[in-house]
Amino acid sequence: MQKQLKENCSCDVNIGNLYRCLARMQKAEYITRKSMKSEIGPKRFEYTITTKGKSYLAGWIRELEKQSGIINLLVTNYKKII
């Protein structure tokens, strides 16, 4: 998961923070966690987004889109005056 975040989001994530965040998301019922056997290393977990999580994510994305529009307008107006 840490590798996928780096590849898809271009960010480094502290693994401890990642698992704390996953635990909070599970407690809020945004995701579920299923234990999986591992051939190598410790037990693994599969995380699945819930309907509640999808709804929360959709709202979060809408807010990001609004903020993106505001930022783009700010940059455009800034470029007009410099």
Image: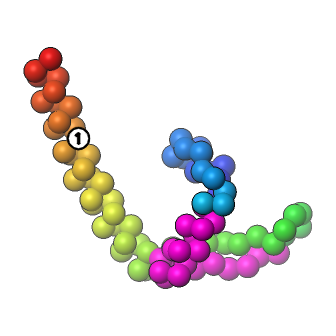
Chain part drawn in magenta: 18-37
Question: Foreground residue, 48 or 10?
Answer: 10
Residue at figure coordinates x 16%, y 27% from the top left: 78
- Quarter of the image with the C terminus in it: top left
Residue at figure coordinates x 59%, y 45% from the top left: 12
Where disc 1 sits, the SS reads: helix
Q: Name which quarter of the figure residue 42 lies in.
A: bottom right
Query: Where is mark 1, residue-wise?
Result: 71
- Does 19 lie within the magenta span? yes
- Quarter of the image with the N terminus in it: bottom right
Give the x, y percent position of residue 3.
66, 49
Extreme residue in the top direction: 82
Q: Can the viewer see residue 48?
A: no
Asked if 12 appears above or below 45 in the picture, the reply is: above
Give the x, y percent position of residue 72.
21, 38
Give the x, y percent position of residue 8.
54, 46
Asked if 45 appears above or below 67 in the picture, the reply is: below
